[in-house]
Amino acid sequence: MYTSQDICIKYAPEESGIIYLDDAATSWPKPPEVIETVANSMMRAGSPSRSSHTQALEASRALTRSRRICAEQLGVAEPENLVFQPGCTQAINMLVKGLVKPGSRVLISPFEHNSVTRPLYRLQKEMNIELIKIPVNAEGGIKLASLMDLLKEHPGATVVCQHASNVSGAIQPVGDIADLVHKYNAKIIVDGAQTAGHIPFDFDMMMVEAWASSGHKGFRGPEGTGIAIMSSSEDFTPLVEGGTGSGSEEGPDLEHVRPDAYEAGTLNLPGIEGLAKAVELICPHIPERRRIEDEYCRIMISGLQEIDGLHIIGPQLGSPRVPVVSFIVEGVSSEYITSVLDRNYKVAVRSGLHCAPSAHEAYGSLLTGTVRASFSADTPKDWIVDFAGMVKEIVTQQRII
C-alpha cells in the first residue's frame, strides 16, 4: 500500500525545481492523500455495479461513499442528483444538451469557455435555439439590470453562466443572477470550473438548475474527473447511453434514473475516489484558503503593475477575483514571455486565448492573447512574490534588444 508520507517525499513542490503557476489549467501538486487514494483504489479488483462478488461489491460501496462525500461538501441533500463525469467539459455538454429544448432562447455572457459556447452553437445549428449575449461591465461582470431586461423580454429562457472567468478571474454574482432568473420563470446552468475549491458553494442553497465542475483544478483532484449536479425538479436527457449495471431487464430504453442513467460505461473509480478525497480535504477549509489566495492576488498584481506597459485584464487591484491573473505587455508578445519564463526560470504559466476567444474579444486581447498566472493557497508564497521580478527582467531585456 502507498502512504502519504512516501508520496510527500517524492512530490514536494519546493524540491521539484519547477515554479508552477498554471493551476487554472490543472492544479499541481496534488495532495499526497489524493495520490495515495488513487493508487490504493487501483489495487482493488472489481467494477462498481457490474457483479455481485466481494470485490465488485466493495467497489460499489466505494462509489457510493465517494458520491456521499461530494454531496455533503457541495450541499446536495439528495446524493443521486450528483453524478460523476470525465471532466467539466462533458458535464456541461450533458447539462446543456440535456436541458435546452429545440427553439429555446439561451442567454450567455461574452466570457464563456468553449465548453459552453461550442455545444450551444451546435444546438443553434441543429435545434434552432436562439443565443443572446448578456451585456457586461469593463471588469467582466454581468450587468444585472441588463439581464433583468432580457429576462423580461424572454421569459422562460435558460441562462448558462460561468461562476468565474478562466481568462480574467472575474467572479459573477451567481446568487443574484439565480434570483433574477427564477423571478422570470427562467433556468440557470452554472459553470463552476474556476470556482470549485476556491469559493464556498452550496447547491441546494444556491437554487440553480444545474452546476458543473472539473475535479482537477481547484479541488486538486485527478485529471479526467468531474461533477455534474442536477436539480431534482428538472429532467435532463442523458448525453451518453450504454451499460450502467442496472435496468437491463427493462430493455434498451432506460428511464432517466439517477445516478445510473447519467454514468453509462465503466466509471473511473480510482479517479472518483481521488476526487472525493480531494473534495473532503479542500472544501472545509475554503474560507481560510480564500484569504490566502486574496493575499497572493494582491501581491502579484501589485508587483506586475509596476512594469511599464503592462496591463492587467479584468478586475483591478482590490476587486474580487479567483486566483487567476492575466496580463498583456505592450510591444512584447505573450508567447515570448511564457517561453522565456519556462526556458530560463522554469516557471510554468499559460499564454494564448485559454479556450475563451470571445472573452479576449471583449477585453481587446484577441490578437495578442494574454499571459495567465494561476495558483492556489498551496502555492509557495515566494513563487508569488518573485514572479513580477522575473517578468520585469524579461520585458526589460526584450526592449533593450
Image (cartoon, rainbow, N blue to C red):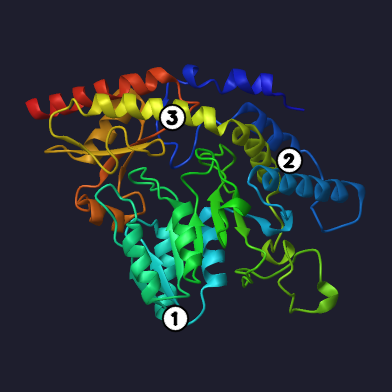
Judging from the image, what secondary structure is the residue with disc 3 in? Answer: helix
- The mark nearer the N terminus, 1 or 3, is 1
Q: Is 340 displayed left or right of 3 in the figure? A: left
Residue at 60% across, 47% down = 202
* Residue 313 higher or lower than 14, as above or below: below
Give me the C-alpha separation between circle 3 and circle 2.
33 Å
Name the residue at the front extreme.
183
Callouts 3 and 2 close, C-beta under 8 Å: no
Give the labeled residue for mark 3.
293
Q: Could you tell me residue 17's position as x and y percent?
A: 43, 20
Give me the disc on residue 126: 1
Give the labeled residue for mark 2.
42
Judging from the image, what secondary structure is the residue with disc 1 in? Answer: helix
Residue closest to the eye, 98 or 158: 158
Residue at 60% across, 29% down = 31
- The mark nearer the N terminus, 3 or 2, is 2
Q: Could you tell me residue 213's position as x and y percent?
A: 54, 50
Give me the C-alpha separation between circle 1 and circle 2.
41 Å
Amino acid type, label 3: Glu
